[in-house]
Image (cartoon, helix red, strand yellow):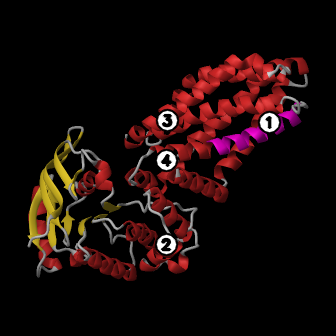
Amino acid sequence: MIPEPLIRVIGLRKTFGNHRVLDGLELEVRAGEAVAVLGANGAGKTTLLKVLATLVRPTRGTAIVAGHDCAKDAEGVRREIGLVAHGSYVYEDLTAAENLTFWATLAGLRLSAAARAGALATVELDRAADERVRTFSAGMKRRLCLARFVLARPRVLLLDEPFAGLDQRAKKWLEEHLASFKTGGGAILMTTHSFGRELAVADRIAILAGGAIALDTARGALSADDVQRLYALHAEDVS
Amino acid sequence: MRRAFIVVWKDLLVERRSKETLNALFFFALLLLFIFQFSLGPDRERLAGTLPGLLWLAFILNGLLGLGRTFVVERENDCWEGLLLSPGDKSAIYVGKLAGNLLLMLVVEAILLVLFAFFFNLDLGGALPALAVVIGLGTVAFAAVGTLFAAMTAQVRARELLFPVLLLPVQAPVLLATVKATEAVLLGEPLGSVAHWLKLLAAADVVYVAVGVLTFDFVLEG
């Protein structure tokens, strides 16, 4: 049986003034699947994520996440997603544990000390639980951001350049974490303009160019070089 | 309620550790009082007439600085986006922010009052309870609108300019009522004699807080 799509984008258009960033974009991501959206700078990758995260309203078309329409039921969408964008959503003057307490309580969760410790251990920050985030590296902040989703258990992860700024150990950890999220039935949509580690996690590769998906293919046995060739063929032609 | 409380807890903890706002407001208050002292001199008669206005001018200027920084901490690491994405009623965030601002403003106002008494050699002892009522009512109205407008202008490029331009006209009736009530209280009149001003302040408090609670969701969503 084919799993239901947790992300469904139909004819999505987004314009900023006269600039049409997304134009008739169609995309589906099913439960247990990870899709990497590749595209040049300014191709609309972040805009697509922001529409799906209900931070930006689409000009036309429909975006449905876990059965909730992004334009009509933002609240429903927000209960189902975890967004990791450029910011890490952490307060520098709070400790890692305090940051988790804050975001979990704000999301309406009742957080026990054990659950908090467990989430921090999952992202390998248990030893830094009582340290202020100001002293953390970018990778540690990214992991702390992900710890929120260990607690909230979203069904959909939206990731903007998730491996950027991470060291090799953190990248390996993230790769394993995303693989286990997929196995648990979650859907992942990640955007990137690199051909690195993201591709190992992805089941499908979608190339975004000219405001639409120019190519959507199973990653299968494609090597990084193959992807790069496809990218050059589809993305750079349009740009 | 828990969600509002966690916002206050976070804001006060951040402020306690960074001390950015409180330190700046304290030195600004000190500076203001030096300027007032030099410009007015020791003439007590002239001072008596201008004191209520000066007191509230100091409160308002400090409040503008403090309230304008309400959402500065949310810009760091895109926490603003995190607030927006957190599921649930956004008015809890407003109530939390308002409570944090109120606490901070009342602390600064208490310090200012002590400094005023010291700088201008005033005996506020007898008028203090009545003064506290007037200051409390005025501060709630100021903080309620200030918190809302701080959120409205937080993502605007000219926010430092826009914030006072929006806030001060709305505060005009509140300012008039607080100055008049403070004047009467400092002259030793009972609170009953300024009941009409106190009613206006209480009404402004209720209306401004209600408007903040009801509209904050739209403001945050932009």
SS category of the residue bearing label 4 = helix
x and y, in percent, of residue B28 in the image: 72, 40
The residue pinned by badge 3 equals B212
How much space separates mark 4 and mark 3, taking CA atoms? 11 Å
SS category of the residue bearing label 2 = helix
Sequence-first disc among 4 and 1 = 4
Q: Please, which chain is the residue tagged with disc 3 on?
A: B
Give, as a single range, the part of the protein colored magenta: B102-120
Q: A119 or A130: nearer the eye?
A: A119
Sequence-first disc among 4 and 3 = 4
Amino acid at the residue labelled 4? Ile
x and y, in percent, of residue B78 in the image: 43, 55
SS category of the residue bearing label 1 = helix
Q: Please, which chain is the residue tagged with disc 4 on?
A: B
Q: Which mark is residue A165?
A: none
Residue at image location 21% in from the left, 60% down from the top: A40
Amino acid at the residue labelled 3? Gly
B129 versus A239 height, above or below = above
Same chain check for tags 1 and 2: no
How much space separates mark 1 and mark 2, taking CA atoms? 43 Å
Residue at image location 33% in from the left, 57% down from the top: A79
The residue pinned by badge 1 equals B113
Which mark is in front, 3 or 1?
3
SS category of the residue bearing label 3 = helix
Amino acid at the residue labelled 2? Arg
The residue pinned by badge 4 equals B93
Whether residues under marks 1 and 2 lie with C-beta atoms below 8 angstroms apart, the answer is no
The residue pinned by badge 2 equals A116
